Image (spheres, rainbow, N blue to C red):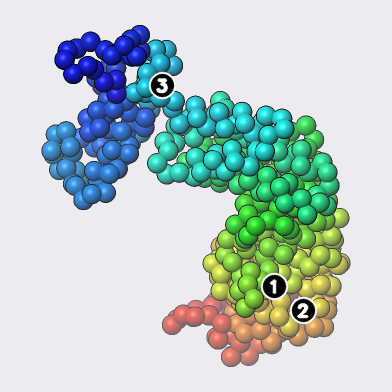
């Protein structure tokens, strides 16, 4: 705040002409400073977020201004007041008390990222910290993404660096810049506080001007030579953003550019694999990698054949055999369902039938709802009935609880196609009392005759 002389109410000489009259309701009742992120309590009183959060974190359960008890400590952004303060700050005379807003400071970082001949890494790291900081108001983050052109500016780093082909892994500075840019875009694309419209800007910026191939090369480079698993997961999240339906950028051409990047697909499959020397799988990496693979493999036959050749089937089977949450299992089933749509995929499943078929049967009716169950039936039908591979048939017939699960599926409102496939599979299972009862974990099993 502007300080006055000790002896009177006149400003010191160095501050003459800088005096600004701050409206009272722009000041936080706690700090008495201009609010940067005004939020309201349930009592209706508005405070600066940082000040009231410290008050609540200190264990206080009353409103500082009214001293009334707080039945709820939820902080509701006061967007109207926030806009009024921003408008006032942009038109008022410069004042040391107000200073640059966080959004204005972040916009300055964007200018440094776009500046030619300047290392963008420091500015990109600060941008990532700004967007990841919980103390920064959501309004400022979205304002930067919307009006500041953050996605477009940062995506240009990936486009420029990807045009070189990505073979210069010894260029540590290049990998570092791309990784920093990926981190910023991943926060914009996945953060809950970023509005959906601004998330879509990320996909649009990555695909703008036919740049998808060069962006795919940059993302593959990060996944191959990044500093750690977090960087690889961030890159996969951006691939998912490019492939996501409804994002405005997920056109057939973009999907084809991603699917035809052999290096990128290989890195996505590697991401689903072991994350440490003990062979453990990282849940975040598995989720990110399988989401991308499921979107790619659902495309053209050429994409399915290429993914099978690169090892997508063993990777998906490995996930099904582990105790990850149902989301990963459902995605793995969808990858296998698409893979068996080509002869190469069916052959790959049959090569590992002893591990693949029991894994698929075990996840039927246990993950992904009806969609996951129908995907499992499609896989079994393709290799056991259509392809009629002896190894797959024997593995299916010997799988624990397979018959019971097929019967349950047929009575649970599945699609006519899934019902027909399940009916044909029933003939290939060994009908005996042990297989009928062992696979259903319930104290009571009631199955109507079929």
Q: Do the residues labelled 3 and 1 touch (CB within 8 Å)?
A: no
Give whichever of discs 1 and 2 has the lower sequence position: 1
Residue 134, x across and y down, in percent: 42, 44
Q: Tag 2's secondary structure? A: loop
Question: Disc 2 and disc 3: Cα gap in Å?
Answer: 62 Å
**Residue 123 showing in the rendered view:** yes
Outermost residue, left side: 67
Instruction: Using the image as rendered, state which of residue 334 and residue 28 is in the foreground.
Output: 28
The residue under the point 27% across, 25% down is: 27
Image height check: is 37 above or below 430? Answer: above
Image height check: is 172 above or below 79? Answer: below
The residue under the point 75% across, 69% down is: 313
Q: How many marks?
A: 3
Give whichever of discs 3 and 1 has the lower sequence position: 3
Outermost residue, top side: 17
Relative horizontal placement of residue 39, taking residue 250 as reference (left or right): left
The residue under the point 39% across, 12% down is: 93
Q: Residue 208 carries which label?
A: none
Instruction: Using the image as rendered, state which of residue 128 and residue 38 is in the foreground.
Output: 128
Q: Name the residue under label 1.
A: 317
Give whichever of discs 2 and 3 has the lower sequence position: 3
Q: Do the residues labelled 1 and 2 touch (CB within 8 Å)?
A: yes
Q: Please state, as top left, top right, bottom left or bottom right, where the C terminus lies in the image.
A: bottom right
Kindly report which numbered mark, 2 or 3, lies closer to the viewer in this rendering: 3
Residue 314, x across and y down, in percent: 74, 72
**Residue 381 showing in the rendered view:** no
Q: Mark 3 points at which residue?
A: 86
Residue 11, x across and y down, in percent: 26, 12
Q: Residue 352 carries which label?
A: 2
């Amino acid at each position: 705040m502007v300080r006055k002389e000790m002896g009177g109410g006149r400003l010191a000489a160095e501050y003459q002409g800088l005096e600004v009259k701050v409206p009272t309701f722009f000041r936080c009742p706690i700090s008495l400073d201009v609010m940067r992120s005004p939020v309201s309590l349930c009592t209706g009183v508005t405070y600066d977020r940082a000040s009231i959060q410290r008050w609540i974190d200190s264990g206080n359960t009353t409103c500082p201004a009214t001293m009334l008890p707080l039945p709820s400590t939820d902080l509701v952004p006061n967007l109207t007041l926030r806009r009024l303060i921003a408008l006032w700050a942009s038109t008022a005379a410069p004042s040391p008390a107000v200073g640059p807003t966080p959004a204005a400071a972040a916009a300055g970082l964007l200018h440094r990222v776009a500046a030619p001949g300047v290392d963008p890494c420091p500015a990109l790291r600060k941008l990532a910290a700004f967007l990841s900081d919980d103390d920064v108001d959501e309004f400022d983050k979205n304002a930067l993404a919307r009006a500041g052109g953050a996605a477009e500016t940062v995506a240009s780093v990936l486009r420029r660096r990807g045009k070189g082909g990505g073979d210069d892994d010894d260029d540590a500075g290049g990998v570092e810049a791309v990784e920093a840019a990926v981190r910023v875009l991943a926060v914009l694309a996945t953060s809950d506080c970023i509005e959906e419209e601004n998330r879509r800007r990320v996909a649009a910026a990555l695909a703008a001007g036919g740049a998808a191939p060069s962006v795919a090369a940059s993302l593959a480079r990060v996944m191959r030579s990044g500093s750690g698993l977090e960087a690889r997961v961030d890159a996969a999240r951006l691939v998912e953003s490019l492939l996501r339906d409804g994002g405005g950028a997920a056109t057939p051409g973009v999907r084809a550019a991603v699917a035809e990047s052999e290096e990128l697909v290989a890195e996505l499959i590697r991401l689903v694999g072991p994350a440490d020397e003990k062979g453990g799988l990282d849940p975040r990496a598995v989720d990110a990698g399988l989401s991308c693979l499921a979107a790619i493999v659902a495309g053209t036959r050429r994409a399915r054949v290429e993914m099978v050749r690169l090892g997508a089937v063993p990777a998906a089977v490995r996930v099904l055999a582990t105790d990850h949450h149902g989301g990963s299992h459902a995605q793995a089933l969808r990858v296998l369902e698409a893979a068996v749509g080509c002869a190469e995929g069916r052959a790959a499943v049959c090569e590992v039938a002893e591990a693949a078929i029991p894994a698929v049967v075990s996840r039927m009716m246990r993950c992904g709802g009806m969609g996951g169950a129908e995907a499992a039936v499609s896989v079994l039908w393709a290799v056991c009935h259509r392809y009629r591979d002896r190894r797959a048939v024997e593995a299916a017939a010997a799988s624990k609880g397979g018959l019971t699960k097929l019967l349950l599926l047929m009575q649970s409102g599945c699609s006519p196609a899934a019902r027909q496939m399940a009916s044909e599979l029933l003939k290939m299972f060994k009908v005996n009392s042990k297989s009928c009862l062992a696979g259903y974990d319930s104290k009571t099993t009631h199955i109507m005759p079929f």
